[in-house]
Image (cartoon, rainbow, N blue to C red):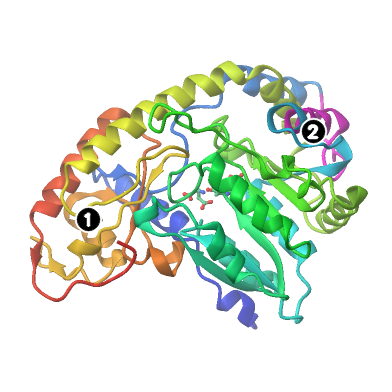
Amino acid sequence: MQVSSAISGMKESATLAVSAKAAALKAKGVDVVGFGVGEPDFDTPEPIKRAAIRALEAGQTKYAPTPGDRAAREAIAHKHRTDNGIDCSFEHVTITAGAKHAIYLALQVLIERGAGNEVIVPTPAWVSYRPLVELAGARCIEVPARLEHGLVVEPGAIERAITPRTVGIILNSPSNPCGITLPAASMRAIADVLARHPQVTVISDEIYEKLVYPEVTPGIAHWSIGSDPRLAGRTITVNGMSKAYAMTGWRIGWMCAPGDRGGFAREAIKLQGQMTNSIASFALPAIVEALTNGAAEVERMRAVFARRAQLIGRLQASIPGLVAPPSSGAFYTFPSVASLLGGRTAGGRVLDSAQAFAEALLEEHAVAIVPGEDFGECARAHVRFSFACSEEQIIKGMERVAAFVAGIRQEIPTVTGTG
Ligand code: PMP
Ligand code: GLU
């Protein structure tokens, strides 16, 4: 059968691949410590589940309007106005099958195929941005951040990457995979740059908005770039239920695009209507419940993640060769292992890449992590740990990592990369 080159040339999601591999080993009875997939280990809070169950019991089993019903869209618009300072109404919101789907829609609507469009992605960045940008028909232009700068991208580097062909930029703070929240001053400096380039649409992926840790970096806070009046008309804010409410399997995300008097949102809804229609209709009341009454549960989970961020930071700092900024957001740490590459493991494997490092760690010590390569060119010597697991698992896993690293013997010249 024919397969298009756009799809055959696309990479598989590295994060999902690691999680499938770890799950397969677990099913065989191997005691794997899973630092792989970025998925909260908590269950969805009970009142949110009850809202969907009530809707099902009341017969809410039919198609809903493509962008979602009015109540759920109003709840999301209200959240953006009050939490984020984004001037919007329900008509600017479409509810999608996860934030991933919202990013897909935004890029499909934005990019003119075959016109040489470019989309800037500060890296290290989440593995799905590049494939989705390329699938929509644009070039993905990476702007690497430096480890010496705590993986915070330099606004000047963004400005230097902007050309007349630049149609968009994808920002993601708190960041997957970096595990950092961009300091307010950096975000505002990026906004200053973007304000000077009116042809650039901003896609702000704020899926980790609620997972920010002033306990790790005092004073750190989330700021939505769509609240900047200079950018409000050309910022698409993407968010969802997956991370803050422990609802990954529900597949609920959204985009909020107030610009163009709602014109961009209408085009996205048109595409969605030819694609998936609405999300599962009985899930819509769960959004209203979560956004109206869920704040205490979100804070309870955030506080647990903050303790885990501190714990994994301490344990990681005691392992020579792992160098990362402190985790001030999301649930990741993204150390460089550059100084360990080129070595040979106790099991005899040669560590010639982050991929080899991750594979050897899984095979020799049953710890699943994601290798850095697919997070960007500058991330080739990094690996990602997701700490969305218990403190016991974190301690056990990092003991294994320490034993693994202690067994590495240097043999061949070190591979270079960030750090
Ligand atoms: N953006 C980022 C940065 C992510 O890490 C994820 C995780 N899956 C998503 C978007 C998509 O989330 P979902 O589709 O589950 O809403
Ligand atoms: N975003 C999460 C991760 O990076 C979930 C998997 C995915 O969709 O990539 O692990």
**376 sits left or right of 245 in the view:** left
- The structure residue drawn at horizontal position 55% and vertical position 73%, both measured from the top left corner, is 10
Please report the residue visible at 33 percent of the width from the left and 46 percent of the height from the top: 27
Secondary structure type for disc 2:
helix
Residue 349 seen from this side: no
Give the CA separation, mark 1 to mark 2.
44 Å
Q: Residue 332 carries which label?
A: none
- On the image, numbered disc 1 is attached to which residue? 361
Q: Is residue 181 left or right of residue 319?
A: right
The spot of residue 310 in percent (x, y) is 32, 31
Q: Which of marks 1 and 2 is nearer the N terminus?
A: 2
Q: Is residue 153 above or below residue 137?
A: above
> Closest to the observer: 219 or 117?
219
Residue 18 occupies which quadrant of the picture?
Answer: bottom left
> Vertical placement of 39 versus 303: above or below?
below
Instruction: Give the image location of residue 232, x and y in percent.
Output: 78, 46
| 377 left or right of 224 in image | left
Q: Nearer the viewer, residue 56 or 75?
A: 75
Which portion, as a residue range, is magenta?
A: 59-80
Q: Which residue is drawn at 72% across and 62% down?
A: 107
Q: Name the residue under label 2.
A: 77
Quadrant where the image shows the N terminus: bottom right
